Image (spheres, rainbow, N blue to C red):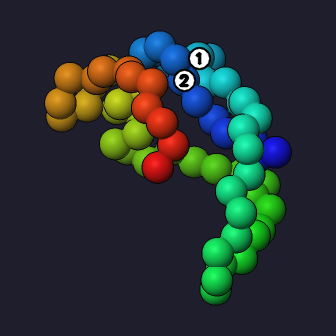
Amino acid sequence: MAKIVRFHQIGGPELLKIEEGPSMGLGKGEAKFRVQAIDLNRAESRFVHGYYLEPTELTRKSRI
């Protein structure tokens, strides 16, 4: 299982949730690696707080 950081409502970092989801299989030429830390970039941070360039809208979409 893969660990995924998600948020289900707009707000501060206390709303980020670590969830588990299915791991995607590896394709040709791909590698699997372990991540020990992540960061949100400026656009992601603004989206989480509801200040993105376009109005923030949370929807449930299927995995691409």
The tag earlier along the polypeptide, 2 or 1, is: 2
**Residue farthest along the left direction in this orientation:** 54
Q: Quadrant of residue 61?
A: top left
Q: Are marks 2 and 1 in contact (CB under 8 Å)?
A: yes
Q: Can you tell which mark lies on residue 7?
A: 2
Instruction: Report the residue marked by disc 1.
Output: 15
On-image quarter of the N terminus: top right
Q: Nearer the viewer, residue 63 or 15?
A: 63
Q: Residue at x 78, y 55 (%)?
A: 36
- What type is the residue that disc 2 sits on? Phe
- What type is the residue that disc 1 sits on? Leu
Q: Position of residue 26 (x, y in %)?
A: 70, 70
Q: Residue at x 52, y 17 (%)?
A: 8
Specify whether 52 is left or right of 20: left
Q: Residue at x 77, y 68 (%)?
A: 33
Q: Position of residue 13 (x, y in %)?
A: 57, 23
Q: Is residue 49 visible?
A: no
Q: Is residue 55 visible?
A: yes
Q: Is residue 60 above or below residue 11?
A: below
Specify whether 40 is left or right of 52: right
Q: Residue at x 45, y 24 (%)?
A: 60
Q: Is residue 30 above or below residue 26?
A: below
Q: Is residue 17 above or below residue 53?
A: above
Q: Is residue 1 above or below residue 61?
A: below
Q: Nearer the viewer, residue 21 or 50?
A: 21
Q: Secondary structure at mark 2?
A: loop
